[in-house]
């Protein structure tokens, strides 16, 4: 699920991040994280410390997922534009086993990447972020990671499709208009939206990275009712912004879908992709 629908529509708050965290963690690929852990194990002596940068860290969900799955000795730099998110991430994560240090930096996507990613970085990671940025920004990101010899793990990039059951007449229209809204400029050039993860793969391969991807789809049933409601409202607001002359149509769709939710008959699947890039020096072959 992409960050941008909620950041742009005003829903990108702590409650939203809290609602989605367990679903994010369940959707992610453990196999790619295992490969990343192997990269660190092969690259560094046992017990050696290493540097990780989390771009757009929010309140620390990505870090909380990765910390127990990666070797100890982690020295994290958390980067986000929101000081309150950084404070929450620091408070919640500082004492986790496996972390040596956490450093928080308040910065937006418009900052030069060489100022955000030190040359000593071993891993650059982000979650639900890259649909916000342009091709040029991704190219700069990957070039900087290559300069550092850093592995790249980008999780939960929205793939452009979602399916709601039972199906309703305007589902396809809502999805199409929402995807168009995704591609508005979010402050880092024309946003790639659903095309972000394939472009990231292309950029990594151009820099000589070995690349693996895995599905990381959300599966939301009645037990995730609060998240369903927030997601439906976020989609509706984005489409209302995209199609201001169709407000009544959007409202009818939203009312219908909220009724489905209230009756516990709604399920939602949202397609995402995880992407892992390992520098050529790591020498790992991508599985077929």
Image (tube, rainbow, N blue to C red):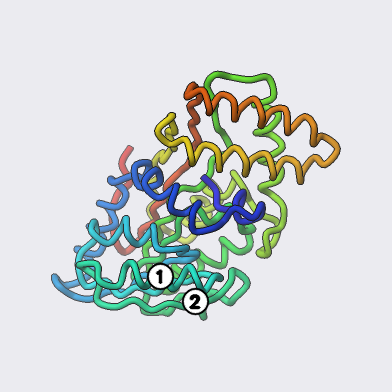
Camera-side residue: 220 or 222?
Answer: 222
Q: Earlier in the sequence, mark 2 or mark 1?
A: 1
Q: Quadrant of the C terminus?
A: top left
- Quick check: 57 left or right of 108? left
Vertical order, 134 against 178 (above or below): below
Which residue is drawn at the image coordinates 33% and 67% (left, top)? Answer: 92
Vertical order, 219 against 44 (above or below): above
Residue 121, located in which quarter of the rendered image?
bottom left
Extreme-front residue of the structure: 262
Camera-side residue: 174 or 160?
Answer: 174
Q: Position of residue 210 (x, y in %)?
A: 38, 53
The residue that label 2 is drawn on is 116
Q: Mark 1: few, some, or many residues within 10 Å (few <14, many ≥20)?
A: many
Q: Is the Cβ of the residue at disc 2 closer than 8 Å to that at disc 1?
A: yes
Which residue is drawn at the image coordinates 55% and 75% (left, top)? Answer: 107
Q: Circle 1 — which element?
A: strand
Number of disc labels: 2
Q: Circle 2 — which element?
A: helix
- Quick check: 12 left or right of 70? right
């Amino acid at each position: 699920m992409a960050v941008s629908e909620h950041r742009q529509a005003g829903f990108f708050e702590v409650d939203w991040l809290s609602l989605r965290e367990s679903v994010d963690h369940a959707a992610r690929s453990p196999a790619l994280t295992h490969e990343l852990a192997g990269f660190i194990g092969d690259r560094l002596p046992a017990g050696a410390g290493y540097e990780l940068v989390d771009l757009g860290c929010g309140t620390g969900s990505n870090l909380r997922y990765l910390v127990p799955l990666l070797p100890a000795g982690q020295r994290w730099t958390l980067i986000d534009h929101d000081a309150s998110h950084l404070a929450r991430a620091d408070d919640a994560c500082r004492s986790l086993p496996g972390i040596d240090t956490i450093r928080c930096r308040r910065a937006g996507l418009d900052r030069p990447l060489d100022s955000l990613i030190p040359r000593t970085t071993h891993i650059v990671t982000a979650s639900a972020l890259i649909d916000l940025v342009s091709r040029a920004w991704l190219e700069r990101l990957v070039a900087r990671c290559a300069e550092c010899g850093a592995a790249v793990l980008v999780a939960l990039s929205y793939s452009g499709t979602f399916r709601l059951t039972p199906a309703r007449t305007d589902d396809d229209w809502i999805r199409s208009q929402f995807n168009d809204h995704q591609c508005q400029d979010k402050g880092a050039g024309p946003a790639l939206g659903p095309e972000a993860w394939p472009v990231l793969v292309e950029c990594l391969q151009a820099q000589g990275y070995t690349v693996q991807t895995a599905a990381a789809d959300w599966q939301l049933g009645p037990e995730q009712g609060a998240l369903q409601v927030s997601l439906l409202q976020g989609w509706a607001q984005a489409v209302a912004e995209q199609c201001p002359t169709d407000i009544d149509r959007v409202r009818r769709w939203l009312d219908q879908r909220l009724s489905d939710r209230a009756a516990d008959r709604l399920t939602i699947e949202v397609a995402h992709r995880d992407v892992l890039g390992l520098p050529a020096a790591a020498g790992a072959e991508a599985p077929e």
